[in-house]
Image: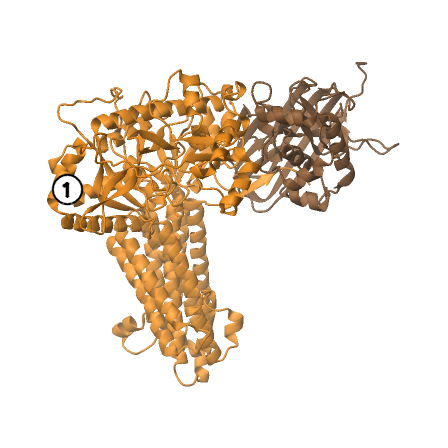
Amino acid sequence: MTAKGADELLDASGRLRAPWRRVLGSLLGLGVATLRDRGAELERACAEEGAALLGGSGPAAWRCDPIPFVLSETEFASLAIGLAQRAELLEAVLADLYGPRSLLSNGHLRPALVYPNSAYVRAVRTTAPERRTPPRHLHLYAADLMRGADGQWCVVADHTGAPAGLAYALENRRIMARVLPELFRSMEIRQLRPFLDVWQDSLQRLAPQPAGNPGLALLTPGHADAAWFEHVILARALGCSLVEDDDLTLRGGALWLKTLRGLRPVHVLLRRQRGDALDLLETPSSRSCGTPGLLTAWRDGALQVLNGPGADFAEAPALAAFLPQLARVLTGRELVLPTAPVLWLGDPGHYAAFAADPAAWRILSAGDRTPPAARDATQKALLLAVAERPWAYAAEGLRVPSCAPCIGAGETLEPRPVTLRLFLVWDGTAWRPLPGGLAQVLGPGEAAGNTRRAGLTKDVWVMLEEGLDIHGPPGLPLPQLPVRRVAGDLPSRVADNFYWLGRYLERLENTARLVRLVLAKLSRDTLLPRDLPDMAALIACLADAGVVSEELASGAGPGQLADLLARALAGEAGAVARLSGRVRDLADTLRDRLSGEMHATLAHELRRLKGARVLLRPGQRAVGIGLMHEFAGEVLQFCATVSGYAAENMVRGGGWLFLDLGRRVERAQAVAGQVAHALDQRPERLEAGLILALDLCDSALTYRARYLAAIQALPVIDLIVADEGNPRGLGFQLATARHTLSSLASEDDAVIIATLDAALDETRLLMGELADAPLHPSTAALVAHLRSIGAQVGQVSGAVMRRYFALLPVTFTDGLFR
Amino acid sequence: MIYTVRHVTQYDYATPVDLGTHMLHLQPRTLSWQRVLRTGLLCDPAPAAMRHATDCFGNAVSWLFLDTAHPRLVVTLEATVEVQSPASLTAAAPTPGWETVSRAAAEGGQAAYEAAEFLFDSPMAPALAAAGEYARASFPAGRPVLEALTDLNTRIGRDFAFRSGATTVHTTVAQVLAQRAGVCQDFSHVMIAGLRSLGLPARYVSGYIQTRPPPGQPRQRGCDQSHAWVACWLGAEHGWMHVDPTNGVLVRDEHVVLGWGRDFSDVSPLCGVILGGGKHSLKVSVDLEPERPDTGS
């Protein structure tokens, strides 16, 4: 293909287009070298913002070219009019296909174009007696456009399900304004913010109960989704809660968000989940995700779902092939903006046109723009598949998009092919365009209308023209809006994740401490008989913590034990790898809840830790005890860095409270259990047990500072069990957890707090008993008290999880007896 | 015939279920050959909310929302239904060649656009090549569609062994074809997949069938079962023909229709999602009792 695309800079007569003249003048005034510097700055900004949320890199990573894509107000207005007409047409097509189906009964569309498409969601056709008017399908619409060699714009792709790319457009504008401020000062560029206001207001207006403060939520498939970055940015920009399936529940015919402060109603759901994955009861093809009953609330009008669950169908390239005819049938008008040539191969006429010259067409699946499956990778296999089931395929004409100048490697600007994505939102009476958009710079061999997320992009500038005053559709008079608050209620799922992040961090730290104590004993040349009971207690602690199996470790000699510890520290299935993996997963899940810096610190420290772990390489050679000791130190350092960072930088709100609560609960359980193991020895070994207990609680130094060398039960137990000022002691954990819980408190929390009080009372009881016989205490009674306190803390943890998180397993049942 | 249907589904949960949402396709359908004289759904415990609607295939569908802890759920359908034979056709009636029907279905338009919805892959009955090969033996070129359909129906009844427990709700058509054994749901899916791969619209029909006690013994209560069979489109003139591949017979007045869809997943009598509950056990009892034909009709 040697065809050359049109040049964005030049009009039909070869003159530089007016808006470009002004922009290029200012840009080139800066000089190409300065521009390249600014380009590098933009790239860094994208990488930072993107990586904080996205973690992506390589060619698919989002970048922004410093040279914008420029449109005159007049040209933009005509594109917006064409797209509004197209959006209305698609709405009419959807309303028909999910309603009377006259396009099918009149033979305007063949059955094979509609029924096999998985985006045609049959549940949308279910009719409830209560339903008044059928809900609209389209609310946000985006289209990909390109300028052909003839200089005319045409539509390459429609985005009607959950149109992507808007967040990139907003972010591009934000960082461009930061990096190239002088351009924004000297030129009249239309602002994007008013569009967000229109969008937000329309969401308020679309809420089923217009009075009050409607609950808005953006439903994301989760942090593993490729478009998660967008979901976070959009939720922030629109001031709605970012939610996942697990956060939602249906009660009394309405949708609710589970938060720490109970259920909060959701009236408008911006879905970024496939339309057939919203309700796992009603969509048989995807019984793994969705909220059961969600569609009944939508059908009753208690919930607005945007875009409608069936809207993805309008993206089908096969449908685009018939839009000119459908425009005539449904609206009696011609499409203002043409569609790029596309065929549906299930139509005999279209198939003939394709078969006459297959090389002139690119084959797509009929239902969406994803390239055909991998088994059809070769052209020959693909043609066979097409001949077998032609209705499953569409074909689009190969066309070369126009070129726009980009910053290249050389001294001059490089022309590169560009497509344009524009966005429109329905405000209740009219389609309102975003005066801007996302220009995608195509790489070599990349097709227009592709499905990639970002890559190299450009900010789109709509230039105000002097002497020209264009008005959009008049705004609706808005009802007096109540004060809107950004949803601040922490979803239960997020609190749950913070709680477990706290617990796993603590468990990791505890593992490293225990291992270091054992290594210190092993590093002596020989184990003396009097060391053996201490070793047994330590092994019991290690087994409790899940570091080694008690079975293997209890009979092991020093060499074998060192091997077991090496595997626990450095092995891929070892405790350190397992726990730091959990920490990493949770940190990823919480990416939108941690500051960018905190997430970056965590990621960096985790990488460092993994690097150090891999260096140990157990199994290939015996790992020296010194090296292991050093590595356990690295683990402790990692935990200290993360805890310190959290303590200094996290706002003392919901997330931090649960992170800290998790740590306290984990440490309280560990201390109670470990001190019990240390003391669970023959009475004559009491002193040795007390020394071990001090070591386990990292409190030996503090003790010596207070009491010099004499080891006695009362002061030792006071320091590690009762003293609420010792951050490594039991009393501190219990008192802090109690404080945290009472700051969350509602009446329902009284039971949990009472359990904690009971544990605190038991520490006092224990101290009282000890004070009665300070020199010859009953170790058995001490151990029993400690174990009972540990059990109470376990109850607290269970109660916290039930009270705040309530994420029970979900089961699908099919009432058919076989 | 007039039948009284009693279909009881009982779940016992190991620990109480806090939240349950269930979707029911459990009301007999009113049809030209089936009159619903009385129907009612009972749910114990009483649900916090219930919703009713009509799905895209015209079936009644209901939702139960339970939001207080319950260790057991019992859903009971009680209905009285009068049934005649659905088809005016006998197996020997003249019908068009099957290719003509297939072409009309693909074409769509006024006569065929509704039937054509049952022409394409569905989650549990994809147009599988192996199923097509099996079916094709009954469909030589130009054979009248009803004759071919009856032949396929008889062959499935003969070639496949009815074996309870040989399959589960998730067994695929390919597996059933390979093992040549299963239950009514499996045979229906095999037949639907075969008909679709020949370009013939085919439906999954959910309902009940009267069982006959061995000669000389009285009817036993509660030993009947949910049943499934197939309806195939024979073109605009003749419409849908109901056949029962499990028994190798045409459907007459011993079948009671609950509803139909593209396959089982569209019309599962009772499926749900529960929160908590641990392991659960399921008991189903179906009773289809013919009323004494004392009215003389």
Percent x, y for residue A685?
43, 78
* Percent coordinates x, y for residue A591 in the rendering: 33, 49
Label 1 is placed on what type of residue?
Answer: Leu
Q: How many marks?
A: 1
Does residue A194 appear left or right of residue B60 in this picture?
left
Q: Is residue B14 above or below residue A469?
A: below
Is A44 above or below relative to A161? below
- Report helix, strand or loop for mark 1: helix
Q: Residues within 10 Å of mark 1 (few under 14, many from 20)?
A: some
Q: Residue at x 36, y 78 (%)?
A: A626
Q: Where does label 1 land, which residue?
A: A27
Residue A766 vertical position relative to residue A459 in the rendered view, above or below:
below
Identify the residue shown where x is 27% and y is 59%.
A644
For this view, does A474 lie left or right of residue A280? left
Q: Quadrant of the C terminus of chain A?
A: top right
Q: Position of residue A571 (x, y in %)?
A: 44, 68
Q: Nearer the viewer, residue A214 or B112?
A: B112
- Residue farthest to the right? B216
- Which colour denotes chain A? orange
Residue A286, position in %: x, y? 52, 39
**Quadrant for the N terminus of chain A in the image:** top left
Q: Is residue A215 visible?
A: no
Which chain is brown in the picture? B
Q: Is residue A247 left or right of residue B5?
A: left
